[in-house]
Amino acid sequence: MLRYLVRRLLLTVPVLLGVATLVFALIHLVPGDPAQAMLGEGATVEEVQRLRGQLGLDEPLLVQYRSFLGGILRGDLGTSFRYGTPVTGEISARLPNTALLAVAAMLAAIVLAIPLGILAAVFRGTAIDHAAMTFALIGISMPNFWLGPLLAILFAVQLGWLPVSGTGTPAHLVLPAITLGAALAAILARMTRASVLEELRELYVLAARARGLSGRRAVLRHAFRNSLIPIVTIIGLQFGAVLTGTIITETIFAWPGIGRLLIQAINFRDYPLIQGCILFISVTYVAMNLLTDLTYGYLDPRIRYE
């Protein structure tokens, strides 16, 4: 297992380097002068040159790239122009809110989708199966930028049951978590159904029933357990998508997380903060993929020996 872990970590290094390179290229791919874009059309030539010096844009590209990578290794992502504070501090201050929202969305999706997928597989072809797959189809078809305002209008504006924006109480978390977790729940329910259904056709499940094991225990203890690898794959890979989806969801519900911080940084043309937020989201996505691979190795030892 240790050898497998080391190999996966080494393979992640070039991926992280590529992510950092793409994030660095962002500021150079923007049409025009980034310093001019930050200061606006009314800025003088002296002000533009001064800002270019502060950003290090007047140095050769290779020197800028080396300084950027060095800053990442030191944990220094620059200083936000809007707040005048380190970018790492701004991200760290909002990380708990984003993590709370992402975890709540994942838990809501798992609690709803896995039992629904198992029921759909066990009662294949019945009304339960059709109802579960209809729910999955609806969940996949509704993007969060449409579902979020719809839930806000219904439950916050018309019914008044839940707050429409902000943080402070568990009630503030309900609408953003449902909005963010709906698509994941739909995908996870379909994957759970397909995976469990495939295992139910195997002979070992029939043998377990022949030994006197109840249907419920045969499904949960054998079929579901052996179908975990594709389910874990979806959960691990979709966590990165959930984190990316917070950009829209946090903006809709005014949730003070990293996604909303990124949108505000874009509006204020705060390039160091934009780079920091995108780098954090990208690295988190890569880290979740790595964690998913390591979970593979734990659940199925055959993967480690390949």
Image (tube, rainbow, N blue to C red):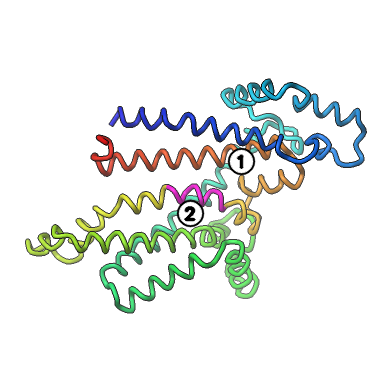
Q: Residue furthest left?
A: 211
Comparing labels 1 and 2, the label whose residue is closer to the camera: 1
What kind of residue is marked 1? Answer: Ile
Observer-nearest residue: 90 or 56? 56
How many numbered tags mark residues here? 2
Q: Residue, x 56% and y 53% (percent of image)?
A: 245
Q: Which residue is mark 2?
A: 104
Region rendered in magenta: 237-245
Q: Residue, x 18% and y 61% (percent of image)?
A: 218
Q: Residue 290 location in percent, x, y?
A: 41, 38
Marker disc for residue 142: none
In the rendered view of the protein, which quadrant contains the N terminus? top left
Q: Are the residues tagged 1 and 2 within 8 Å (C-beta)? A: no
Horizontally, residue 103 falls left or right of residue 94, namely left
In the rendered view of the protein, which quadrant contains the C terminus? top left
Vertical comparison of 44 with 288: above or below: above
Observer-nearest residue: 170 or 231? 231
Q: Residue furthest bottom?
A: 127
Observer-nearest residue: 24 or 100? 24
Q: Which residue is mark 1?
A: 278
Residue 39 included in the magenta stretch of the image: no
Q: Residue 101 location in percent, x, y?
A: 53, 52
